[in-house]
Amino acid sequence: MNSQLKKGMLEYCVLATLRTSDSYGYQIIKDTSGVIDLSDSTLYPILKRLEKQEAIESYSVEHNGRLRKYYHLTETGLADIQGFLDDWQQVMTVYDYIKGVN
């Protein structure tokens, strides 16, 4: 996949992963692996940006004697997903144009 196109979808993949349940970094990478390649160095800046935008919230839970940071989708994040889905029709119009479908 083109890196620019991929970059535009990464945040929405992370948000969609959190739609069903709270999760932590490593698990988010595993959950998205069948859809899009995501590395630690890519994920954590995205999580930080989404938290700053109030699309997600974080909290810590002790796991095996260590604190694990979990992320939770907020109403803002849910609205961001819906906005992406609403905009998808425009993307499909451009896709059809490029493909030559009228």
Image: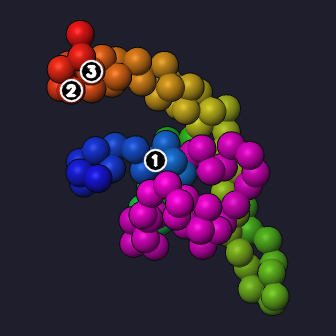
Locate residue 70, reporting x and y percent.
Answer: 70, 63
Determine whether label 3 and label 1 are within 8 Å by CB.
Answer: no
Q: Earlier in the sequence, mark 3 or mark 1?
A: 1
Determine whether label 2 and label 1 are within 8 Å by CB.
Answer: no
The correct choice, above or below, for 33 with respect to 87 in the image is: below
Locate residue 79, reporting x and y percent.
Answer: 59, 27
Q: Residues within 10 Å of mark 2 (few under 14, many from 20)?
A: few
Q: Which disc number belongs to residue 64? A: none
Q: Quadrant of the C terminus?
A: top left
**Residue at the location (51% across, 48% down)?**
13
Find the distance from the CA under tag 2 to the CA under tag 1: 26 Å
Q: Residues within 10 Å of mark 1 (few under 14, many from 20)?
A: some
For label 1, the residue is 11
Locate residue 98, reporting x and y percent.
Answer: 18, 26
Determine whether label 3 and label 2 are within 8 Å by CB.
Answer: yes
Locate residue 60, reporting x and y percent.
Answer: 74, 68
For label 2, the residue is 99
For label 3, the residue is 96
Residue extending farthest to the front is 101
- Residue 57 visible, this orientation: no
Camera-near label (3 vs 1) is 3
Indicate the secondary structure of the residue bearing disc 2. Answer: helix
**Left or right: where 21 falls relative to 97:** right
Q: Say if the magenta span includes residue 30.
A: yes
User: Which residues lie in the magenta part?
Assistant: 15-43
**Residue at the location (27% across, 21% down)?**
96
